[in-house]
Image (tube, rainbow, N blue to C red):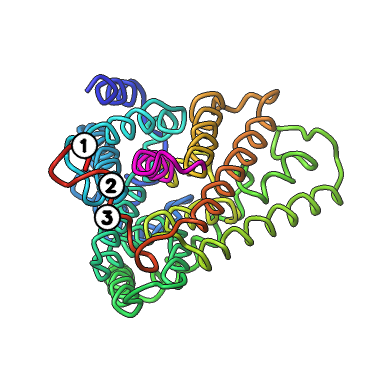
Amino acid sequence: MALVSQRYLAAMSQVQPDLAVYFLPAARAIARGGSPYGVEGYFYTPLLAAVLVPMEAAQWAQIAWTAAMLAAACGMAFFAVLACTPNWSWLHRAWVFAVAIVTLLWSWPITMEFFLGQVNLFVGLAIALAAFFASRGYFFSTGLGLGLAAAIKTWPVLLLLWVFRRGGRERIRTLSAVLLWGAIMIALAVSLGGVPTLVSMITSPFRGTNQDVLAYSVWGLGRALFEGVQDFPPLVVSPLAEVLVSVLSALVVAGLLALALRAPGTDVISLYNVVFAVILLIPISHQVYVLLPLPALWWWLARTAQAPREIRNWCVTSVLVGWWIVTFRLVEFGLDKQTAVLTVVGLVVATLVAAGASTIGAATVRSPQPGVEPSGAGISRTGGLA
C-alpha cells in the first residue's frame, strides 16, 4: 500500500503530459464529432480516445486515469504471478506477488510511466492476462488478451509471432480472438470517421516511427553511440560503426527470437521472451517498455523455488536480477545531455543480456508437454512442501 500511495501522490503532483496533450484532446475530438487523428502525436487505435470520451472535459480525469494505471499495475502483477505459479498454494504465491509489486512499483520506469500518464501498464495487464489464460489452456481468451494489447498500442501485434512457437496449441482459436479485436477496431474507426479514419488508424503507427527521439532498441544503440539524437551528442561520429552495431545487434536479437519460437520452454516464459525480443527490435522503443518483460524475472524466481538444485535456474535468475538493478534502479530516466547516451547503452545492453539469458535458459527447460507449464516441483496446491 505504501508504494501504491506513493505512486498516486507523485502522479497527482503535476500534469501528465501524454494524457493532457494527446489522449484527452483525441477524446474531445471524438466527442465533437471529429477524428482522433486530427490530434498531432496520436498514434494509437481509436479505442483509447473512445474510452476517455466520458471524462474528456472532467476535472477529475487525471484522478481516474491515475487510479486506472494503479489498478492495471496491480492486475499485471496479479495475473502474471498466477501464470508463473500454476498449481501453487496461495500462501506460496504471496511472496512471489510481493516481489512482483516491489520490482514493478519501486523503479524508474514506473516513475516515468506515471509522470507521462502513459498506457504501457494497460498493455502489460493485457499480456499478463494472455499469459494467465495460456497457462490454463484457454487459448481463445489468450487471443483476447493479445488482441487487447495490440488494440491499446498497435505494435504489440508483433507478439502474435508467439502463436507460431513450436508445440503451440490451438493456434486457430487464438488467432480468431485476435481477429475479433481487429474487426472491432475497424468497425470503431469507420463509425468515427469512415474510410479516412480507418486509413489513419492503419498509417498512424508508421508515422510514429519517424519520431526524432532516443530509441531504446538495437536501432537506437548504434544511433546513440555514433550519430546522436536531437541535442544528445554521440561518443564518436561514424556512420559505418552505427550500421554495424545496429545490424549485428539486430541479428543477435533475431536469433534469440527464433530460439524462443523454436525451443519455447513453456507457454508463459516463451511469451515474455518474445516480448523481450520485440521491444529490442521495434524502431521506436521507449525506456518504459522494459516494464513489459518484467514478469520473466518473476517466472525465473518461481522456477528457482520449484527446482533449487538446477544451477541453470540460479544463473538465469541472477542475470535477470542484475538486469532489474541496472534498468529499473540504477539508470535514471531523464534528458541530461551528459548521461543520455549512457542511459541508452546501459538499458539496451542490459536488456539484451537479460533476453539472452532468459531465452537460452528457457530453451533447456523440459516440461511434460510442449508449452505446458510445470506444476511446481515440490510445491503443493494446498500449501507447504510436497
Residue sticking out furthest to the left: 382
Q: Residue at coordinates 64% horizontally, 61% vertically from top-left?
A: 255
Residue 34 appears in the rendering: no
Vertical position of residue 199 compared to residue 297: above or below: below
Q: Is residue 24 left or right of residue 53?
A: right
Give SS at disc 2: loop
Assess whether residue 301 is covered by the magenta stretch: yes
Q: Which amino acid is tagged 1?
A: Ala
Relative to 43, does residue 321 appear above or below in the rendering?
above
Residue 274 is situated, as x and y percent measured from the top left of the image, at 49, 58
> What element does badge 3 sit on?
helix
Which residue position is annotated with label 1? 64
Which circle's residue, 2 or 3, is located before the other in the chain?
Answer: 2
Magenta region:
295-311
Q: Work out whether residue 117 or residue 103 is closer to the camera in this orientation and state it.
A: 103
- Distance from disc 1 to disc 3, alpha carbons, whole Å, reads 26 Å
Instruction: Kindly identify which residue carries mark 2.
Output: 85
Q: Which residue is mark 3?
A: 132
Q: How many neighbours does mark 3 have within 10 angstroms: few (below 14), some (14-19), or many (20 or more)?
A: many
Q: CA distance from mark 2 to mark 3?
A: 10 Å
Of 51 and 77, the residue lying toward us: 77
Secondary structure of the residue carrying tag 1 is: helix
Main SS category, magenta section: helix
User: Which residue occupies 80% across, 33% down?
Assistant: 235
